Image: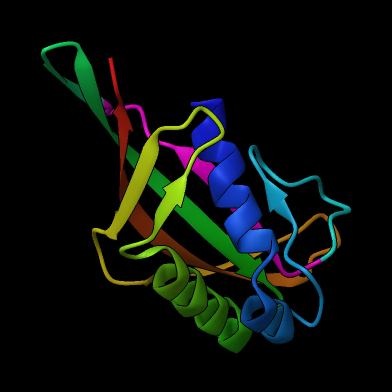
């Protein structure tokens, strides 16, 4: 799934409208962001509920994806999440392995109650849920 991660990260970090919302190019983490990470940021996780279907050697794998947009301002978190959702919903990309990727948003943007970082600054989180279908030809 490395090709899927690379395609999603490239799409997010290369998006000018998202950079305008964030005030800088988006930083994407694949695990929890370190406490010293600059806000806003994106945390990208692939879900565990992957399902594969085989057809005469071809394979389609459905991968749940969750993106958390974390910011010190609720409006930036929500606007950033909307942009990421719009950017990736119905997106079709060529992966580095030559497979085809189609993403579909599976839920509305979900805002979480504010949390606090190690310096006790309020952090706001908005979640984007996608389902990505990766096609691998035999």
Give the left or right position of residue 81, taking residue 23 as reference.
left
As drawn, the residue found furthest toward the top would be 57
Q: Is residue 97 magenta?
A: no
Q: Is residue 111 at all visible to an observer of this figure?
A: no
As drawn, the residue found furthest toward the left would be 55
> Is 80 rendered above or below residue 41?
below
Give the left or right position of residue 92, taking residue 105 as reference.
right
State the extent of the magenta-drawn residues as a range: 39-50
Percent coordinates x, y for residue 78 in the rendering:
50, 80
In the image, what residue occupies the spot 53% across and 58% down?
A: 68
Residue 15 in which image quadrant = bottom right
Q: Quadrant of the C terminus?
A: top left
Residue 77 in which image quadrant = bottom right
> Is 33 rendered above or below residue 96?
below
In the image, what residue occupies the spot 36% across and 40% down?
A: 100
Percent coordinates x, y for residue 108 in the rendering:
28, 71
| Observer-nearest of 110 and 7 | 7
| Observer-nearest of 9 and 43 | 9
Percent coordinates x, y for residue 34 in the rendering:
80, 45
Q: Is residue 15 at all visible to an observer of this figure?
A: yes
In the image, what residue occupies the spot 44% across and 62% down?
A: 127
Q: What colouring does the structure picture have?
A: rainbow
Residue 86 in which image quadrant = bottom left
Q: Is residue 46 magenta?
A: yes
In the image, what residue occupies the spot 27% across and 58% down?
A: 104
> Is 128 rendered above or below residue 63?
below
Total marks shown come to 0
Give the left or right position of residue 24, taking residue 98 as reference.
right
| Observer-nearest of 105 and 101 | 101
């Amino acid at each position: 799934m490395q090709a899927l991660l690379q395609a999603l990260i490239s799409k997010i970090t290369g998006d000018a409208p998202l950079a305008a919302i964030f005030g800088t190019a988006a930083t994407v983490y694949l695990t929890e962001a370190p406490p010293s990470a600059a806000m806003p940021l994106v945390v990208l996780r692939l879900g565990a509920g992957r399902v594969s279907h085989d057809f005469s050697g071809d394979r389609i794998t459905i991968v749940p994806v969750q993106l958390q947009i974390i910011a010190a301002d609720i409006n930036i978190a929500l606007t950033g999440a909307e942009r990421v959702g719009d950017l990736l919903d119905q997106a079709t990309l060529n992966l580095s392995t030559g497979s085809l990727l189609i993403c579909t948003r599976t839920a509305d943007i979900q805002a979480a109650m504010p949390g606090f970082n190690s310096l006790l600054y309020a952090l706001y989180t908005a979640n984007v849920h996608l389902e990505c279908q990766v096609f691998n030809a035999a």
